Amino acid sequence: MEGRYSLVEGVAALLADEQGTLRKEAPYRVALCYPSPYHVGMSSLGYQAMYGEIHAHPGATAERAFLPDDVEAYRRTRTPLFTFETQAPVSSFHMLAFSVAYELELSGLFSMLELSGIPLLKEERGERHPLVVAGGPLTFSNPDPLEPFVDVLVQGEADDLIHVLLEAAASMEKDALLTHLAGIPGFRVAGRGGKRYHVAKATDSRLPARSVIVTPHTELRSMFLIEPERGCSRGCHYCVMRRTTNGGMRTVPPERVLSLIPAHAKRVGLVGAAVTDHPRIVELLRTLVDSGREVGVSSLRADRLTQELVDQLRRGGATNLTVAADGASQRMRDLVDRKHSEEQIIRAANFAKTAGMRQLKVYNVVGLPLEEDADVDELARFTTELSKILPVALGVAPFVAKRNTPLDGAPFAGIREVEGRLERLRKGLRGRAEVRPTSARWAWVEYMLAQCGPEAGLAAMDAWKAGGSFAAFKRAFQERDCQPFVARRVEDGRRRPTEWPKVENVAPPYV
């Protein structure tokens, strides 16, 4: 009992520091699960929005559960996974609703089900087990690997669908419920029909999503998150949230955004796929900063930055300016339809310097199809040029093709090739900028999960059971015969579209 007491005590300490925690008695109880630790989950605007929506439903209540920081402590003390609000076992709830952001969180889902005493495979669960549901950002691209483990997939924006789900789940037996949901666009129930790869769109009246709880124990410390816009009007080829998804960008008037920010929120994060594309973003920023708040903005676009906008960010507490280049060279940026130039990124660096910021963070990608050594050399040259204006931290991720994009089905460059490009970049920079790369090995695992079907989910389960190492994933993908395939490549949308390479239906390179 002493072991369980210390785990409960740790959760109680986190709860004590929260503002906005909801508690409610209701007939239908949902354990809202996030397959990463608390500090990550509570930084997710979508997860927080679902918490608020479930509580807004008259017959339902939600309690939160997260992947523990120390999974072994739960196993060692034989402590069932419990919720934060009442420390009730997750297995005692009617529904487990998982919000899954990206492919590598599958392992966290397995650990949470195991700690709850719930069989991983849906076919091994009976009437006495809770309904297991999954939604979240992953469903915008490829939720196939989740299929073997969840009873229902909620695909796309769940702001409205969560109410449809709760209404039906509270009044129907499981078998009838699954058949019913399979006939509603936005729900996927494997084996019962329904539309695959449907991306549901929330009604505008549900916007904007915003934080319910503010806590200091997150990636974005004590920050109230709210979206001034949803979606994007741009056509970047690698991005799931491009203009073809749900009709592009939907903006929220600054007056509405401001009216929903609570008085106690001293730090505000404006979140969305293209926040700086909002036509009134400077006005919104200025109003927030003038009210004495600190402000952060996600997804800054170099071509939309002005000195005034950057000055407002600095006034709001920002010490670094972050932009995404997303292409090693101008040639690659043009190919993926990333609408900005070196000149615009240099201008952004100068804005940051003038505003008194300390560092420029630039996100980039290597390993795009058709990329050559000369493109990486250009990235080294250009980054060196930027570093003469302001110290540069260069985040570099290997390219991973996603479903529902023009680059769907494009091959992974290869682990050795990506590591070679990263080494070439480091040598070209000669220490003049900090390079923060994402693992090429784990990018390949992400690629396999992003491009394969349900069998890749089963392979992820095998790998998790075998310890979760890269070698375990590599072996499991081979044994399950996981093969990437072109599933839903959307149109480029240009008069002269880029012809991207496609994976042939042959065994993938397990290297």
Image (tube, rainbow, N blue to C red):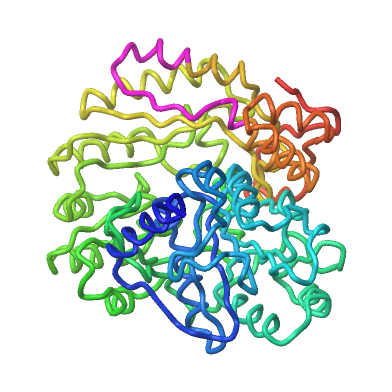
Position of residue 429 measured from the top left corner of the image (x, y, whole percent): 35, 15
Q: Nearer the viewer, residue 270 or 333?
A: 270
Q: Which residues are magenta?
A: 423-443
Q: Please state if 367 lies on the left or on the right of 384 as rendered.
A: right
In the image, what residue occupies the spot 77% across and 37% down?
A: 484
Q: Please state if 500 lies on the left or on the right of 104 as rendered.
A: right
The quadrant holding residue 198 is bottom right
Residue 222 in the image: above or below residue 204? above
Image quarter in which the C terminus is found:
top right
Q: Nearer the viewer, residue 92 or 406?
A: 92
Position of residue 360 measured from the top left corner of the image (x, y, whole percent): 27, 35
Q: Nearer the viewer, residue 391 or 134?
A: 134
In the image, what residue occupies the spot 57% across and 36% down?
A: 335
Position of residue 99 measured from the top left corner of the image (x, y, whole percent): 56, 60
Q: Please state if 226 lies on the left or on the right of 268 as rendered.
A: right
Residue 487 in the image: above or below residue 253? above
Query: Is 440 contained in the magenta span?
Result: yes
Q: Please state if 178 lies on the left or on the right of 159 as rendered.
A: right
Query: Is 144 contained in the magenta span?
Result: no
The quadrant holding residue 228 is bottom left
The quadrant holding residue 450 is top right
